Amino acid sequence: MEHRPWHWIVMVALLVALCVISLGSGVIHIGARDVVGALTGSGDPGTVAIIRQLRLPRILLGALVGAGLGMSGGALQGTLRNGLAEPYLLGVSGGAAVGAVIAFAFAASSGAVVAVSAFAGAAGAVVLALLVARAAGTAGRGDPRTLLMAGVVIGAFANAVIMIALANSPPNTIRGALWWMMGSVADGTWSTIPWLAAAVIIGGAALVYWAREIDLLALGDEAAAAMGVNVEASARRIYMLAALLAAATVAAAGLIGFVGLIVPHIVRAAGIRHHRPLIVAAGVIGAALVVAADLAARVARPPGELPLGAVTAVLGVPFFLAQLRTAR
Amino acid sequence: MISFSNVVVRYPGASTRALDGVSFDAHESQVTAVAGPNGSGKSTLVRALLKRQPLEAGSIAVDGADVRSLSQQEIARRVAVAPQREELSFPMHVAEYVALGRYPRLGLWRSATAPDHAAVDSAMQRAGVVEFASRRTDELSGGEWQRVRIARALAQEARALVLDEPTTFLDLSHEMALFELLHALAHDGMAVLLVSHQLNLVARFASTVILLDHGKVVASGAPETVMQASLLEQVYQWPLVITRDPAVGAPALVPLRKRSSSSYLP
């Protein structure tokens, strides 16, 4: 498929439409006109409160988390030259989960404590993965596979730590930790949005700025060097940016799998191959995927909710498989 | 244009030097070829030029400037290199791929402008790849892919072009067409430095041949001076004779069968 300007219109329209549908859907159904009215502050005060205080922050949180994960995955797959790469593979998920579980184990009641602890865990794991890969690499940044393996091993280690920490924990702690590990934007509040928006916009813009280097790193280290890229510094910068961006989303909403893996593939299938437009498009599609998954998680079995991370996988995997079949 | 002087490179942990005091120049308007057996240090020269391998001693200069004092981007503006290994993890269109060659010339915002598009068009025309501009890189034949790689290198608009084994996997006509293209580029004023196994073709197209063995220059000069049977037999450890190409009179190497050999190894 060719990359055409109307693809952008379709992508943005899809995201906006999903947001409007999601704003209107839930235990209390609200029509599109009332949704728009409530957004501008007019209409029934109860409806305005539901839309502006409950659903809008939740949907914005989902969109920001999806955008961050999509952009992070797009950057990492190019830099690591591997279509299986995703932010969680670099140890982000394992590290974040260890941080969160430690917070739960100490009975942290505040979401902010869990978020900060998860972010610290994710950042720590990424730095550790980079150090391990650097120590194992013989020359330069070594084989990108070494970094992936370091991430996988650190993830496995993190899982062991989590199981040990949870083994003798009270059921409430286990349930809280499990829900956190399945990811959710249900607790989205206006206090989370500004800092996550800042992280996603700054991190995403930086990745877009360095996207030309990702195009060249995707050709191999020697080719990238031949075209003027300072390979080691550039790759390290992109890993860190992508990982911290993913860590910020994990701190805000827990672990939401598959988004960082499948979104870049969907974007490439739409004919977008240079990383500058690819990362922007991965942000839009990632946002749409998480908003759609959250919508499905809310309406599937009311008044209960399904775990968001499981729904992204359920929605994303068939799409991904269909794309693999038609990929040419 | 590109000047190697007394270059010494040793890979970490290796007891011997990969390059041991290599000196030669690749001049403008000439095809300079580096030949030699596997493991003689040919590709290490390219890696050292790109600063992918630190020098233990000596220096490499491009346009009179030591590469160590140049940024990676400054080197790429002066010398376009098509390395031997290149993995295209995610296929793209030929025109998109050639446009990647503009990276070292992009400004602060790294956005392509009209001169960049013009340079890409001109590079594709020069390399003869315009007809498959809209094809995908994974749909190209080996010969087409090599030409596309050269187009990408030409898009860098450097005055020197370095190619590491560009004719590997190419059939006769594609190989000849590629050498003709390199010859034409040198005729237009470029300094072309070619790392190649194809001694017979090198002898026909290169002005200067550098013969490497175990990291040392064992002969250099016009093809006639380097293409000596006794020297090449010693370097390649294989019996051979040198004849004259009947069509153009260039020296040509013919490897012989070993009469009583129980092993295929040299």
Image (spheres, rainbow, N blue to C red):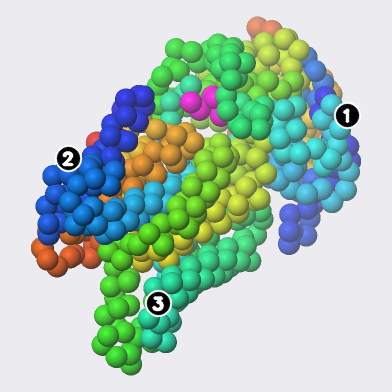
Rounded to the nearest whole Å, what is the CA distance between mark 3 and mark 2? 36 Å
Closer to the eye: label 3 or 2: 2
**Residue type of the residue flagged with mark 1:** Gly
Chief SS of the magenta region: helix
On the image, numbered disc 3 is attached to which residue? A110
Q: Secondary structure at mark 1?
A: loop
Q: CA distance from mark 2 to mark 1?
A: 71 Å
Identify the disc placed on residue B64.
1
Q: Give the answer, above or below, for where B215 lies relative to B144.
A: below
Could you say where residue B76 lies in the image, as x and y percent from the top left? 70, 31
Q: Nearer the viewer, residue B165 or A213?
A: A213
Amino acid found under the numbered disc labelled 2? Arg
Q: Is residue A154 left or right of residue B166?
A: left
Foreground tag (2 vs 1): 2
Mark 3 is surrounded, within 10 Å at the Cα level, by few (under 14), some (14 to 19) or many (20 or more) other residues, namely: few
Q: Nearer the viewer, residue B157 or A112?
A: A112
B231 in the magenta segment? no
- Name the residue at 82% across, 30% down: B62
Describe residue B68's horizontal placement relative to residue A303 as left or right. Answer: right
Name the residue carrying label 2. Answer: A33
Q: On the rendered image, what quadrant is the N terminus of chain A found in?
A: top left
For label 3, the SS is loop
Q: Residue furthest bottom?
A: A168
Chain for disc number 1 = B
Residue A193 or residue A215, whichever sits in front? A193
Image depth: mark 1 or mark 3 in front: 3
Q: Disc 2 sits on a residue from what chain?
A: A
Q: Which residue is rendered at x = 56% and y = 45% of the image?
A: A206
Q: Which stretch is magenta?
A: B96-101
Q: Residue at x 33, y 47 (%)?
A: A287
Whether residue B127 is visible, yes or no, is no
* Residue B22 drawn at (x, y percent): 84, 39
